Image (cartoon, grey):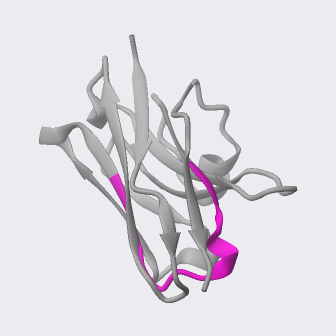
Amino acid sequence: QLRLVESGGGLVQPGGSLRLSCAASGFTLDHYTIGWFRQAPGKAREGVSCITSSDSSTYYKDSVKGRFTISRDNAKNTVYLQMNSLKPEDTAVYYCAADRFDPRTYYEFNTYEYNYWGQGTQVTVSS
């Protein structure tokens, strides 16, 4: 059974850092594109970043470029989202998603209907 489990969320002050993990079981993660999404209360879900299966291309939402970094550890079957210089507007539940497709743009990554999702991890940025 294919499963994704997020971890690493928490409460952090503005300017702080967190590293989210998306651990996969039941499938080999590097055969899938993995995306990170977030949803804040009262707002639509939005794509944050993804790493593709074919060539590990990465895409980022404009507002996180230069602050967030996505990476993959195939040996651990885990994808990470390193989040630095966090802002209150980064507060949301963060989800990882997986599917066998290769987006060529941020738009494609953000609008694709992923089949596999984790349960989410809360990130709160507040002083």
Q: Residue furthest top?
A: 1
Left/right placement of residue 112 relative to residue 18 reads: right
Q: Would you place residue 44 above or below residue 60 in this image?
A: above
Quadrant where the C terminus sits is: bottom right
Q: Is residue 58 left or right of residue 90?
A: left
Q: Is residue 4 above or below residue 47?
A: above
Residue lying at 49% horizontally and 89% vertically, measured from the top left: 15
Q: Residue at x 41, y 35 (%)?
A: 5
Q: Nearer the viewer, residue 99 or 104?
A: 99
Residue in the foreground of this view, choosing between 118 and 63: 118
119 shown above or below 58: above
Bounds of the magenta segment: 80-94
The spot of residue 63 in percent (x, y) is 63, 78
Whether 15 is drawn above or below 32: the answer is below
User: For residue 29, what is the image quadrant?
Assistant: top left
Residue found at the very far right of the displayed protein: 42
Instruction: Tell me what residue is drawn at x 31 percent, y 17 percent.
Output: 26
